[in-house]
Image: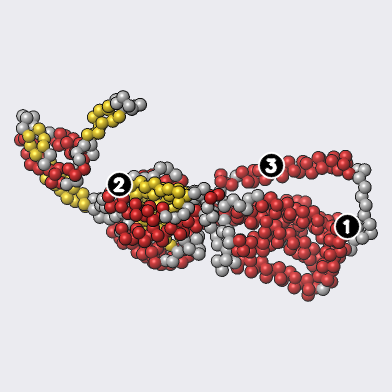
């Protein structure tokens, strides 16, 4: 995630350094110039700040005075945290690498069995195109039969640009601009997938609806790599894995990288007859190449054209699709005699050798699929299929790849980064407070961000993505800052001779406003990103996490400090 997300930490770190300089230099200077002679009226019953202080003191005094009530509040916060975390296994919050984007295009991939004629493949592609053209959001559709569509993200990372042959077709579905339609491209893909699948089934082809994703660059959303040294055993294991894919609810667009058996015809030259007839083998090969593939022996320069036009020489299609017709090709010998090809060569029919795929030097067969329905994340589909796929994979074994592997790697790396952040924060706070216990107290509210983040994702229905995780990491610094403000103020009051209870109450009451303003600034900043499909998770994490954790921090930190200080005093 480093190259993808690098602008966020670089920009945020640079902005924090600049703001630190402004806070230490510019803000005091402006305060001196603008506020030095400004009136500061404040009556005994003051303004809003006095009301905030009175409200905070009324709320916190009973908690400090009654240990059972204090313990009940802390236990309630722990229950809230556990309930929030439970939203993930309950699938009320779904985890995904990156959310679906809202593009103005879709791609439909059509794969017919090997040996299917171009006309049959084109007929299936046109039938699907006619059905999709009836959708109100579809502007136009381009059909590419026998070749690939122009390059796009999927074409590059999924190798669609290499697709060629009479049994393949691509449909480029162009949608109306986002401002002119209510449904997102993902919603349209979900709606048209059953329609395309039904038509594909009638024509005996496989079809995949490929959205143009923001990432990650993988072969497919679900990829099972079936390994094994024996090709037949590996193919049979892949067939069983494909069956598991087909039977699993929510798994769609299934396919495998195994070609159907197809015949191969070779003209084998009888060298003795060719020599007696005065016909060279290279002449026979060149004649067959000319008849089947064609040659471009020259270019023409028509007056109406800006550049040269290649001249292609080949037999008509009807004359080059039959072996008997090709056997009637006439070859001229060195003596001038005309000899038919059938007298000089025989047709040898053998099975076409299948493609062999390797990864890291090992033979592999790929089984691929996508996810659709209520749980549109590969994590849950793989959890459903994992045991059945492992059993079906045979002795060679099955390895999961695709978006699942990238998701696991990204969240693992972000988790490691989060752990590193916590260690660095702990070291910094230890250096400031000269205590090994106080930093633990200050960092205690960091998990409380989940009380806002996970319910926020559940209520909005947004995936918990990699950007959400980055928002959670960023919140750690914000929440620790609030905790430091409170603890530092408490210790400053204690050094002035205030009682523990008064120091705790004063810290929360006086620091309430700057802490609340910090949270409000984060929420307002998150509003800018909330409509972006990719960074929605970051915005929701920042907004909901800072709201919940700030409210809880103002209660939890004073209570924990009071409880630990009382306990330490009683032990002393």
Which tag, 1 or 3, sits closer to the chain's start?
3
Callout 3 secondary element: helix
Which tag, 2 or 1, sits closer to the chain's start?
1
Q: In which quarter of the image is residue 95?
A: bottom right
User: What is the crowding at mark 2: few (fewer than 14 residues within 10 Å), some, or many (at least 20)?
Assistant: some
Which residue has dot 2 on it?
165
Q: Give the camera-side residue of 274 and 539.
A: 539
Which residue has dot 1 on it?
47
* Left or right of 532, for residue 28: right
Q: Give the camera-side residue of 123 and 235.
A: 123
Give the residue at x 27% y 50%.
119
* Left or right of 66, for residue 14: left
- Pointer 1 with pointer 3, Cβ within 8 A: no
Which tag, 3 or 2, sits closer to the chain's start?
3
Which of the numbered marks, if any, corresponds to residue 14? 3
Query: In this rendering, is residue 133 above or below 339?
Result: below
Quadrant (top left, top right, bottom left, bottom right) of the C terminus? bottom right
x then y, percent, for residue 257: 34, 54
Callout 1 secondary element: loop
x then y, percent, for residue 168: 33, 50
Give the CA distance from mark 2 to mark 1: 79 Å
Whether residue 425 can be seen here: no
User: What is the crowding at mark 3: few (fewer than 14 residues within 10 Å), some, or many (at least 20)?
Assistant: few
């Amino acid at each position: 995630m480093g190259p993808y997300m690098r602008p966020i930490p670089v920009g945020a770190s640079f902005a924090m350094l600049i703001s630190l300089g402004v806070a230490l230099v510019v803000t005091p200077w402006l305060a001196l110039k603008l506020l030095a002679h400004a009136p500061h009226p404040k009556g005994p019953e003051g303004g809003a700040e006095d009301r905030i202080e009175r409200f905070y003191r009324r709320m916190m005094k009973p908690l400090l005075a009654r240990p059972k009530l204090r313990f009940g509040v802390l236990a309630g916060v722990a229950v809230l945290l556990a309930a929030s975390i439970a939203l993930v296994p309950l699938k009320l919050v779904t985890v995904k690498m990156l959310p679906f984007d809202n593009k103005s295009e879709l791609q439909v991939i059509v794969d017919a069995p090997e040996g299917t004629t171009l006309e049959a493949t084109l007929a299936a592609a046109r039938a699907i195109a006619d059905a999709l053209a009836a959708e109100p959001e579809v502007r136009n559709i381009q059909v590419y039969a026998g070749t690939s569509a122009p390059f796009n993200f999927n074409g590059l990372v999924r190798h669609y640009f290499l697709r060629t042959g009479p049994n393949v077709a691509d449909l480029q579905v162009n949608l109306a601009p986002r401002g002119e339609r209510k449904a997102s491209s993902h919603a349209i893909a979900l709606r048209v997938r059953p329609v395309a699948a039904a038509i594909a089934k009638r024509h005996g082809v496989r079809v995949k609806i490929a959205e143009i994703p923001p990432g990650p660059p993988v072969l497919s959303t679900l990829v099972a790599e079936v390994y094994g040294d024996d090709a037949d055993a590996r193919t049979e294991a892949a067939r069983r894995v494909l069956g598991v894919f087909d039977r699993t609810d929510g798994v769609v667009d299934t396919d495998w990288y195994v070609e159907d058996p197809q015949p191969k015809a070779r003209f084998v030259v009888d060298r003795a007859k060719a020599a007696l007839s005065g016909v060279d083998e290279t002449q026979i090969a060149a004649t067959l190449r000319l008849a089947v593939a064609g040659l471009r022996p020259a270019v023409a320069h028509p007056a109406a054209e800006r550049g040269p036009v290649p001249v292609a020489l080949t037999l008509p299609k009807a004359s080059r699709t039959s072996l008997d017709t090709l056997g009637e090709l006439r070859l001229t010998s060195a003596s001038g005699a005309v000899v038919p090809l059938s007298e000089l060569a025989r047709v040898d029919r053998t099975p076409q050798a299948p493609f062999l795929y390797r990864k890291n030097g090992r033979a592999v067969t790929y089984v691929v699929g996508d996810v659709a329905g209520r749980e549109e994340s590969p994590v849950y589909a793989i959890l459903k299929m994992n045991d059945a796929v492992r059993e079906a994979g045979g002795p060679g074994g099955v390895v999961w790849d695709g978006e699942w592997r990238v998701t696991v790697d990204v969240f693992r790396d972000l988790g490691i980064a989060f752990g590193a952040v916590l260690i660095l924060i702990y070291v910094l706070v230890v250096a400031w407070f000269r205590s090994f216990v106080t930093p633990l107290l200050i960092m205690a509210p960091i998990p409380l961000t989940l009380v806002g983040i996970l319910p926020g994702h559940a209520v909005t229905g947004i995936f918990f993505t990699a950007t959400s995780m980055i928002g959670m990491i960023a919140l750690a610094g914000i929440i620790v800052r609030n905790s430091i403000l409170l603890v530092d103020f408490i210790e400053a009051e204690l050094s002035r001779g205030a009682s523990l209870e008064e120091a705790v109450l004063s810290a929360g009451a006086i620091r309430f406003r700057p802490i609340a303003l910090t949270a409000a600034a984060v929420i307002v900043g998150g509003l800018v990103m909330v409509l972006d499909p990719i960074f929605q998770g970051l915005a929701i994490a920042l907004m909901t996490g800072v709201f919940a954790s700030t409210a809880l921090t103002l209660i939890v930190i004073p209570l924990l400090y009071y409880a630990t200080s009382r306990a330490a005093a009683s032990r002393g």
